[in-house]
């Protein structure tokens, strides 16, 4: 079995863990459904190749009432009928913000405007901060080769 290079950096610096947990709590307080946030986290984690988060977020989504059908389809959300227009807008924003270097205009107006049609300013702030947060976790886990299913440390 693969071993992590080191303890997850957020556990090495407990104040960093507290800050990340506080950011997570703040994003959840803005009124975006936990199911939507978990779908976003799963999609960003798939893009970033974070095995820990690809393993964890479907479990958290199921606890929030998400179905396997939708979890299995999140990687192909554009081509399936399972997602609402608001969820599609959140997933499109997730992909754009996660893949900043893939295009000259990383978060184009059409993607932003579609999200803004479904979410108010506080919810948009929640979406963007939630995407940033999962990208931080993905980068921490991938950098230290954190192993999915293994305990941290």
Image (cartoon, rainbow, N blue to C red):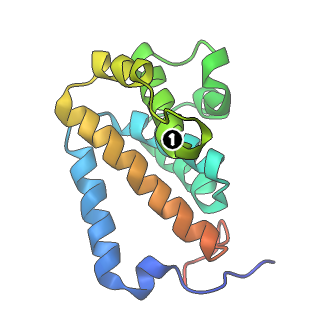
Residue placed under numbered mark 1 in the picture = 62
| Tag 1 secondary structure | helix
> From the viewer's perspective, is residue 49 above or below residue 131?
below
Q: Residues within 10 Å of mark 1 (few under 14, many from 20)?
A: some
Residue 14 position by quadrant: bottom left
Q: Is residue 7 above or below residue 136?
A: below
Q: Position of residue 30 (x, y in %)?
A: 20, 39
How far from the left and from the top, in percent, is residue 140?
Answer: 53, 70
Q: Nearer the viewer, residue 61 or 118?
A: 118
Quadrant showing the N terminus? bottom right
Residue at 57%, 56% (x, y): give it: 53
Q: Position of residue 116 (x, y in %)?
A: 29, 21
Residue in the picture at 30% in, 65% down: 21
Which residue is depicted at the point 51% across and 41% down?
A: 62
Q: Quadrant of the C terminus?
A: bottom right
At horizontal 32% and vertical 34% (from top left) the residue drawn is 33
67 to 131, vertically: above or below: above
Q: Is residue 148 visible?
A: yes
Q: Is residue 45 above or below residue 20?
A: above
Q: Position of residue 11 (x, y in %)?
A: 43, 82
Residue 42 in view, yes or no: no
Image-quadrant location for residue 67: top right
């Amino acid at each position: 079995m693969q071993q992590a290079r080191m303890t997850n950096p957020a556990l090495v610096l407990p104040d960093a863990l507290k800050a990340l947990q506080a950011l997570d709590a703040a994003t959840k307080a803005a009124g975006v459904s936990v199911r939507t946030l978990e779908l976003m986290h799963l999609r960003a984690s798939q893009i970033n190749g974070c095995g820990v988060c690809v393993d964890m977020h479907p479990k958290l989504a199921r606890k929030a009432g998400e179905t396997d059908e939708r979890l299995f389809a999140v990687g192909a959300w554009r081509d399936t009928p399972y997602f609402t227009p608001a969820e599609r807008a959140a997933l499109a924003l997730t992909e754009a913000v996660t893949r900043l270097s893939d295009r000259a205009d990383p978060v184009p107006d059409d993607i932003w405007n579609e999200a803004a049609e479904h979410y108010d300013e506080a919810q948009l702030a929640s979406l963007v901060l939630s995407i940033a947060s999962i990208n931080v976790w993905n980068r921490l886990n991938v950098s230290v080769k954190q192993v999915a299913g293994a305990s941290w440390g």
